[in-house]
Image (tube, rainbow, N blue to C red):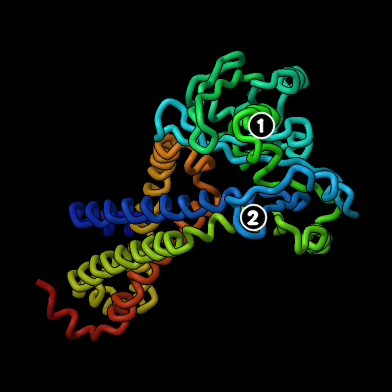
Amino acid sequence: MFLFKLLLKNAFRHKLRTGLTMVGLVVAICAFGLLRTIVSAWYAGVESSSSTRLVTRSAVSLTFSLPLSYAGRIKAIDGVTGISWSNWFGGIYQEPRNFFPQFAVDPQSYLALYPEYQLTDEEKLAFYRDRKGCVVGKKLADKFGWKLGDVVPIKGTIYPGTWNFTIRGIWTGAEASTDENQLLFHWAYINETLRKRLGNRADTVGVYIVGINEPNNAALISQRIDTAFKNSLAETLTETEKAFQLGFVSMSEAILVAIQAVSFIIVIIIMAVMANTMTMTARERLAEYATLKALGFPPEFVVELLFGESLFIALLGGLLGLLLTLPLASGFGAAVGSLLPRFHVSAGTMALQMGAALIVGLVAAAWPAWKMSRIDIVQGLRHVA
């Protein structure tokens, strides 16, 4: 208790200097946490992917479609337990900034493969029966104030025209990582319309979602699917859902690396600022430390004082920065919306923030503590006023 009171008094002996240093720590730790959360949010889709689902797409590019006739052949392959399909819609709700994913799906087979989308039996039945019906995630519904029965007009970009969908269900995620920022509607609805307008674009799908019986057989089943369509007019590329998601993340890998680098640079900068503060503190108290050694206190006591003061300031600043990160992350997540649908500060990020603050405190005090532990008593006492 005596040592803690001494550390507290020493830390706030120069209130302005300590206050400014702590403000810098709070800003740095908060920025570090937000940047790490951005990186985590970018990989959230990868982390929540299922090990029992494969994605089959065109081997040429994701922009090329596959024939609907592939569904039966894929389902007949050994190890496949379920098959569904989806098309990216890419429409606009009211204005372009209201971006959120929209998929045309086969309702019953799709929801069977995604049990994490939790809907009541009544909502599922209403969705199945209404060709112009849709289901949406709870976060998306909350964002726009949608409720059951509302009509959502979506202006098509890939599929021309304005499409009106009636909300028949609002799903909640089985886990916190489940994406609740999507809109799903009937693939058959757009397919029938395309058959009337553009016959050559009908009966095609963007990707197949394939359910498998054993995650360990994912590579083997993927090979079987791709072999079945080898040398056809529309060859396939099958991969795990996680690998499929990683393909999108890799497109922005350079940006993510830059964000991670900036987050560590911020910590290094505040480490230099903190080290400068502790060096100044040690230099000003040279006579005090010399007096302590003259009174018989060992060098280790001086080291404890400097490390204790540095750690106290760093951890207090780190804790305040962590607490500030939570409301800022909440506000930032609301601002970016469905671009980063699962934006929250994880326990791992909080641990990294406090770990960074701890490292800053230790490194900042290392040099001055070593220097003061080796001071000459006579030379130090010459500084006594």
Q: Amino acid at mark 2?
A: Phe
Other-residue count near label 1 (Cα within 10 Å), few / some / many at <14 / 14–19 / ≥20: few
The answer to whether residue 2 of the structure is visible from this angle is: no
Across and down, in percent, residue 53 comes to 75, 49
State which tag comes first along the sequence, 2 or 1: 1
Q: Is residue 368 visible?
A: yes
**Location of mark 1 (residue):** 195
**Image quadrant in which the C terminus is located:** bottom left
Q: Is residue 320 above or below residue 260?
A: above
* Residue lying at 47% horizontally and 42% vertically, measured from the top left: 339
**Discs 2/1, front:** 1
Q: Quadrant of residue 4?
A: bottom left
Q: Is residue 346 above or below residue 357?
A: above
Image quarter (top left, top right, bottom left or bottom right) of the N terminus: bottom left
Q: Quadrant of residue 235?
A: bottom right
Q: Nearer the viewer, residue 340 or 344?
A: 340
Residue with the most extreme left position: 385
Q: In the image, what residue occupies the spot 61% across and 16% down? A: 148
Q: Which residue is mark 2?
A: 244
Rounded to the nearest angstrom, the CA distance separating label 2 from label 1 is 29 Å
Q: Which residue is more in the foreground, 10 or 225?
A: 225
Q: Label 1 sits on what residue type? A: Arg
Along the horizontal axis of the image, is 323 left or right of 196?
Answer: left
Q: Which of 224 and 256 lies nearest the eye of the viewer?
A: 224
Query: Residue 300 versus residue 57: which sits nearer the camera?
Result: 57
Location of residue 286 in the rendering, given as x and y in whole percent from the top left corner: 20, 74
- Which residue is located at x 89 percent, y 49 percent? 76
As helix, strand or loop, the secondary structure at mark 1 comes to helix
Name the residue rendered at 33%, 51% in the picture.
Answer: 26
Q: Is residue 77 left or right of residue 370?
A: right
Single out the residue that lies furthest toward the top. Answer: 149
Image coordinates of residue 204 in percent, x first then y, are: 69, 42
